[in-house]
Image (tube, rainbow, N blue to C red):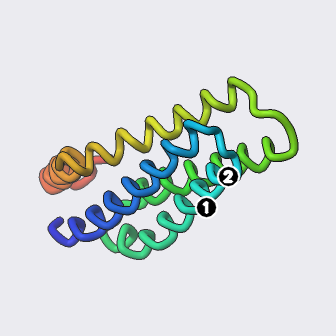
Amino acid sequence: MERFLPILSMIQVRLREILTRNEGYMSSWNIVKIRDVGEDLIRLAHEAYPQLSQVEHKILFQSLREAGLGIRFRATKIQGGMLKEEDKTYFRSVHEALEEICEKIETGEYYQALLDIAEKKKHKPYYKA
């Protein structure tokens, strides 16, 4: 499981940078820049995929990718119209979910949960995580 630490570290650093930028963009509701955040998340997911695949942990790839795709889709849709309160709520909720993931990686809680799952799998060969 130690081989998972470098990819987690890279994701944490890059995700923190993306989230910090996104906070500024959401304070002014700069939809073009928010759309760029979606692109950044998709790029991060795809760059991390080979290493996440090697450690059999594709859920983090999927989470980052889906968040990026959702942000990009919503922002693209808004660019042709008006930003509504429900759009703001959506962007905030995605940001908060990603913030939660990032914090769990930063505190080591994410890695510890992976260790716990690996331990359960070791003792129960048919354990479904």
Q: Quadrant of residue 103?
A: top left
Q: Position of 83 compared to 100: left or right?
A: right
Kind of residue at disc 2: Arg
- Residue at image mark 2: 72
The three-letter code of the residue at mark 1 reads Glu
At 54% from the left edge and 57% from the top edge, which residue is drawn? 65
Residue 36, located in which quarter of the rendered image?
bottom right
* Residue at image mark 1: 39
Q: Residue furthest front?
A: 28
Q: Is residue 87 above or below residue 36?
A: above
When the figure is inspected, residue 42 is found, relative to residue 20, above or below; the finding is below
Q: Which sits earlier in the primary sequence, circle 1 or circle 2?
A: 1
Relative horizontal placement of residue 2, taking residue 97 as reference (left or right): left
Q: CA distance from mark 1 to mark 2?
A: 7 Å
In the image, what residue occupies the spot 17% across and 65% down? 1
Kindly indicate whether the residue at mark 2 contacts the one at mark 1 (C-beta within 8 angstroms): yes
